[in-house]
Image (spheres, rainbow, N blue to C red):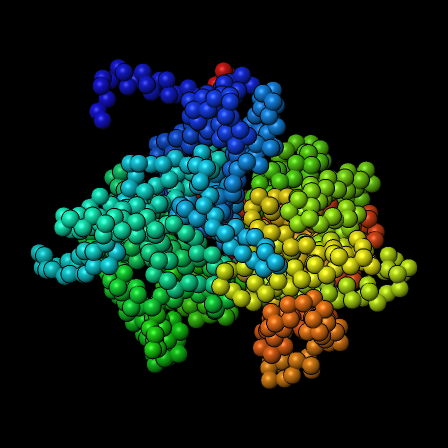
Amino acid sequence: NTPVANQSTNKIWKLMEKYLPNTKEAIQSSVVNHVEYTLAKTRFDFTLLHCYQAVSHSVRDRLIEAFNDTYQYFNNKDVKYVYYLSLEYLIGRCLQNALVNLELESQYKEAMLDMGYNLESVYEQEVDPALGNGGLGRLAACFLDSMATLNYPAWGYGLRYSYGIFRQQIKDGYQVEVPDYWLDRGNPWEIERLDVNFQIKFYGAVTKKVQDGKERTTWEGSEIIVARAYDNPAPGYNTFNTINLRLWRSLPSSEFDFKSFNQGDYFKALESRQRAEFITSVLYPNDSTYAGKELRLKQQYLLVSATIQDAIRRFKKKRKEWKEWPKYNALQLNDTHPALAIVELMRILIDIEGLEYEDAWELVYNSFAYTNHTILPEALEKWGVELLGNLLPRHLEIIYNINHIFLEKISRKYPNDWRKLSTLSLVEEGTHKTIRMANLSIVGSHAVNGVAALHSQLLTTTLFKDFYELRPTKFQNKTNGVTPRRWIRCANPGLSALLNDVVGSDDWVIDMDILKNFQKIADDPAIQNRWMQVKRQNKEKLYWWVKERCGVDLNLDSLFDIQVKRIHEYKRQLMNILYVIRRYLDIKKTPAEERRKLFVPRSIMFGGKAAPGYITAKRIIRLVNAVSQKVNNDQEIGDLLKVVFLPNYNVSNAQVIIPASELSQHISTAGLEASGTSNMKFVMNGCLIIGTMDGANVEIAEEVGEENMFIFGARVEQVEELRNKMRNSNYRDYFGPRLTEVCDAISNDLFGYKYDLDALLDTIRNKNDYYILAADFESYCEAQQRVDNLYKNKSEWTKKSILNTLRSGKFSSDRTIRQYAEEIWDLEPCEIPNPSKSEQER
Ligand code: H53
């Protein structure tokens, strides 16, 4: 690949230095070029989908210019990088986001309209890349947006699953999972890097040899596959910086099963090639529970090994000494899923680069940091030593080594404290011996953080108490955040225009804190009116969405009350639907002429996926649909109450649902939701929260004021006592009369599906009600009453809605990322000069 002659390469470079112009004509010609030359379409077989593809390619061209320049610039400036390692990225649709961030949306809108296309309907053609389950994956996507926008030199690393999270259909009220082969129409956003491939080894054996008086360990894997890079540019807003999300895909290596080929066993050899491709084929659909499957461990190791090899290759190009590794590299673990990266870097440094153990450890320790996202015991990853030792024998050995050295330190510090030794150990002893990935992550990292103040505090006082006492300065808090670019600017154009007028510019898009300065507008009747109009338009959009997908006609004057999130017992969708039944029964009991006076019309919506194996969660969906069926068809009720299950909740649907909501529910058992992030999106969009003092709700209350929310329920300190009270007592003693009546109605088959629904109720009746639903039910009902009372006063409600938005600045992921960069990564921004500002012809 040597260039033919210097002169001609210079010529190429000169030509490449030019940027695509963004005039209407230039945009149109680039779109048309892609229609003709990339898609090879004629005017006779050209559809809206092709239009989307051509527009996306044309936008991608512009992204690539920025993306190439960005890393070139970073490289020249010799910067430190942060590597964000995550098994999940829930990025959602790309086209609008890219146009907004490149500040080209209006130009494209005009150019497309002039050719007869409405850009919004073009957006609708895009399928969501849904390579994540819920909060953790969406957080990673918001972080990429903020890292790019704040000009941090960053790389996102993940896996390119062929199947993202399943598509949810509702059949006869039950969830049905349909595979999401999101790549079937191609993916115009990614850049396949045919030349970026790394070998990944599995299984095999470890051997020790003495070389020059030193013991050298080598690991020969017996299965070798390849990880290939697919790059996904992530543009910043109001900057030319565009960073990369590099996703790995597993492929067979060329040497793959050479033996079978040579022995003429063609089919056996092909079979093993397919096994290699299978590794990145599907995302595990569990949120906050862990699947101890070998395939999942292979996925984790593939991400980790390819990423570390890539980072090392990049570092080696700098020709620095190894001791400078932490100065140039920060590695952030998004939960314990990529925790093997710690071990993989140790292995390479010791076995391949020949570093001494202690020197290698120092580099690892100073570059790694770990974010914990949950204290739920069922989510904590523990790999059986047999499984781990079989798949990655050398890694298990290194883990034992790390543990040995660590426990020696502990026993020197706390002699004979067996309890401490056994809780701190990386190894959980027992009939089924396991490796605790959280302990490994803590021991191997210089910083450990929780994702909201309450959660971080709980980590240090409960789950990681002993680690905290050992080294308190290691533990930090980084309250989550969400990007205002996607969650206001893209999702809520009406509110964006209003905020532009209030502020006098669109500066709030990169500096949400300035909104605080405009709080006096909350009382202004003209602003309030406009605010209500915006909400009304968003409600209309959702109205049509619901009508089309659920066949339900909502009352636009009703209160839009929404709970959308993964279905989980701790999130207590069950409490919400039991309250809906309560309300239904109360309406029925009230004389018809008094109903409208006493009850505010409500449209109560639920949405979210249940993990395919989580039966209780699936029954909750069944109950919501059973209630919906009954209530929506009850002539007596009319539009006073509607209940809807919104199918297939995902990022693009969230962008319609959230801006339309007036009340949103974040009602987890105190102490169990680490942070929550949709609560932040709702608040930004002027939605009032009904919620418990859990996760980031606590900080939202601090920022917007408790008087602007509907807080209820037990506080975290009270939960254990309430549980103790219920333990070994009959549910009839702890159910209040209101809850009893509701459960009896279900058991008396008012909604049908008695078998499923009784089994569901048994989780609160006969299983000691671990999530203290019964204990919180009364105070929840009271909070709901306060909601009704306030909604009757439109002006007061709107005032609170406005204040929620204006005081939500803290929850921008820009704030979060700045804190990570300054307090954990020690990372400086590096902004590349914007050519549009220096080049007139652009
Ligand atoms: O992570 C979110 C939190 C949320 C928490 C969630 C999460 C997952 O989505 C998956 C696994 C896990 O351990 C935690 O439940 O509270 O907001 C982002 O931090």
Vertical placement of residue 675 versus 3, above or below: below
Q: Which image quarter: residue 720?
A: bottom right
Whole-percent x, y for residue 129 in the image = 48, 43
Asked if residue 429 shows in the view, the reply is yes
* Residue under the image location 52 percent in, 41 percent down: 127
Task: Looking at this view, name the residue that lies furthest to the left.
Answer: 212
In the image, what residue occupies the spot 27% across and 65% down?
A: 389
Q: Position of residue 270 (x, y in %)?
A: 25, 48
Residue at image coords 26%, 64% = 390
The answer to whether residue 367 is visible is: no
Which one is in front, 224 or 705? Answer: 224
Q: Quadrant of residue 741?
A: bottom right
Q: Is residue 227 above or below residue 243?
A: below
Total marks drawn?
0
Q: Quadrant of the N terminus?
A: top left
- 190 on left or right of 350: right
Q: Position of residue 596 (x, y in %)?
A: 86, 56
**Vertical placement of residue 267 versus 418, above or below:** above
Left or right: 579, with 114 as reference point: right
Residue 734: give x, y in percent of width and height: 68, 79
Q: Quarter of the image holding residue 705?
A: bottom right
